[in-house]
Amino acid sequence: MRSTLSLFARLLRDQRGTMVIETAVVAPVLVLMSLGAFQVSTLVARQSELDSAAAEGAAIAIASPPNTSAKLTTLQQVIMTSTGLAASNVVVTAAYRCNSSTAYVTTSTSCTSGVISHFVKIYLTDTYTPKWVHYGIGSAITFRVTRYVEYSQSDVP
């Protein structure tokens, strides 16, 4: 019994190998945290990229009003090239507001009198699947960016 106690006391005083045990416990946690941080930074970067593409589309719409379907298509293609998104993920449409209304309408003929504000609606969507989804944690993340840009106003008699 005394030899067992002395062996246990000797093991308690011995510091060799503690670094290996601590590393074995802490290293997986640090690896998971760094992978998570990388995935989150990828999400933030993609959201920023989509916001920048919408801002670029807004600047183009202000500089060259997209008042024809050909110009709307060109604006869509510029945004598609900028983001690498498919045509189904980049929707560029005309929108209008009648007088001081806050609601958007899809045709200018809906406004019967007063001022018609002409807008272009830029709607971008994208889906990102983080690595942790492959391990059954969470699900894919969908990005949605909507931007309305007013490029002119006109009076309806």
Image (tube, grey):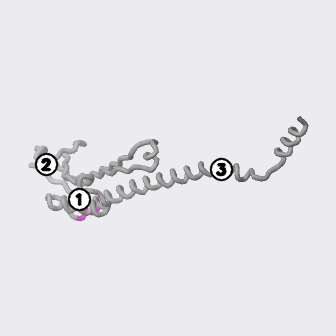
Is tag 2's residue or tag 1's residue first in the polypeptide sequence? 1
Q: Amino acid at mark 1?
A: Gln
Residue, far top = 1
- Mark 3 or 1: in front is 3
Q: Residues within 10 Å of mark 2 (few under 14, many from 20)?
A: some
Q: Which residues are drawn in magenta?
A: 58-63
What secondary structure is marked by label 2? helix
**What residue is shown with label 3?**
24
Evaluate whether residue 98 shows in this view: no
Disc 2 and disc 3: Cα gap in Å?
67 Å
**What residue is shown with label 2?**
108
What residue lies at 35% left-to-right and 50% top-to-bottom? 127
What residue lies at 59% left-to-right and 50% top-to-bottom? 28
What residue lies at 29% left-to-right and 52% top-to-bottom? 124
- Residue 118: x percent and y percent? 19, 53
Q: Residues within 10 Å of mark 1 (few under 14, many from 20)?
A: many
Does the segment drawn in magenta span residue 60? yes
Q: Nearer the viewer, residue 135 or 66?
A: 135
- Residue 83: x percent and y percent? 32, 60
What residue lies at 26% left-to-right and 56% top-to-bottom? 86
Question: Quadrant where the N terminus lies?
Answer: top right
Q: Amino acid at mark 3?
A: Ala
Q: Nearer the viewer, residue 150 or 133?
A: 133
Q: Above or below — where is 40 with respect to 81?
A: above
Does the segment drawn in magenta span residue 52? no
Total number of numbered discs in the rendering = 3
